Image (spheres, grey):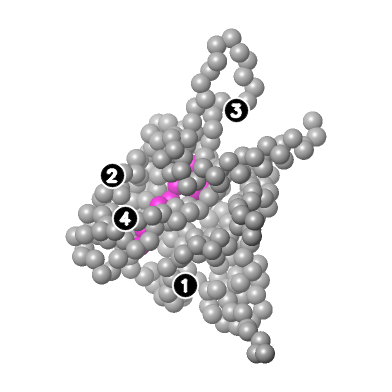
Amino acid sequence: MKKTTRVCAYCGIGTDLTNEHVFPECIHKRSSSGGTISIAHTPQGDKAVDAPVQVNDVCSVCNHEKLSKLDTYICELYDQYFKTIVHSGDRTDFRFDFDLLLRWLLKTMYNTSRSRGWEFRRDDELLKYILGEMPRPPIFRVLLQLIIPTQMPLVRGQVRTEAKEISPMGGSSNNLGVARGLGFVQGYRLSLNSYFFHIFREDEAASSRTRELGFRKILNQTLGGCELSDKNRAVVFSSSLDYMTYLKENPILIPQVELAKHRSDQLRKKKPI
């Protein structure tokens, strides 16, 4: 029987493959609890684990020489912006390198899709862009939305010891359903604490008018959403949308959040007092 050679998910070369983190290890280390809860896909279903999820299909050159630069950059942004929970009335002067940010967002969604068996629309041009070997392919639109914590109501006459607010989950990534006729072929959502990125790839077969009208509709439906561009700077105001309300409007996320909360509670009980 002929042996099948596994190839790198990015460059397509058949060689020894290495583990690539779905979310950078540096972000896991920077979390306030000393580690983040990840949702792993297993034969028995989704499972919350207190360790970074990895994919074992990336060659050493792509992993350690090309993709690692994106992780280094995003962890710099994490220290400057993403680690901070945004509250009502806050304003963020977000300065960034659009291509480095977009390449990381697409890399993370591609990694997530492979780890969970989801669809990801890819081609050689897109993969080479993620690796930094080609200019940005047409046509991506990116929105940033700053989701605020949900404030917990005070109970009269009772001393409350638990948290006064429910903050957004440390990190998550999911596909976004894109309705037909809006001029898009795929959508993704990736969040880091309060920072929610919405990434859309336009349908080149649709007219520019259809694409623009579709994007304006999405923008109007994204409370507080601000489009990011290669101007590399955006002043973004916190959304009026709080985290728990956001979850109610996006029920696909609720099972993941519940799994993560249950695992976090288990770990907290194991800690010595």
The Cα–Cα distance between marks 1 and 4, rounded to whole angstroms, is 25 Å
Q: Which amino acid type is marked by label 4? A: Ala
State which mark lies toward you, 1 or 4.
Answer: 4
Q: Which amino acid type is marked by label 3? A: Ala
State which mark lies toward you, 3 or 4.
Answer: 4
Residue occupying the far front of the picture: 44
In the image: residue 220, left or right of residue 121:
left
Image x and y of residue 102, in percent = 43, 60
Q: Earlier in the sequence, mark 2 or mark 4?
A: 4
In the image: residue 13, left or right of residue 134:
right
Q: Name the residue that disc number 3 marks.
A: 163
Residue neighbourhood size for the residue with mark 3, other residues' Cα within 10 Å, grouped as few (<14), some (14–19), many (≥20):
few
Q: Which amino acid type is marked by label 2? A: Asn
Q: Which mark is residue 220?
A: 2
Q: Earlier in the sequence, mark 1 or mark 4?
A: 1
Residue 159: image quadrant is top right
Magenta span dominant secondary structure? strand
Q: Name the residue that disc number 1 marks.
A: 127
Q: Which amino acid type is marked by label 1? A: Leu
Q: Which mark is residue 179?
A: 4
Secondary element at tag 3? loop
Residue 114: image quadrant is bottom right
Asked whether residue 193 is drawn in magenta, I would say yes
The Cα–Cα distance between marks 3 and 4, rounded to whole angstroms, is 38 Å
Tell me if label 1 and label 4 are in contact, CB under 8 Å: no
Image x and y of residue 73, in percent = 53, 58
Q: Earlier in the sequence, mark 3 or mark 4?
A: 3
The Cα–Cα distance between marks 3 and 2, rounded to whole angstroms, is 32 Å
Residue drawn at 37 percent across, 51 percent down: 143
Q: Earlier in the sequence, mark 2 or mark 1?
A: 1
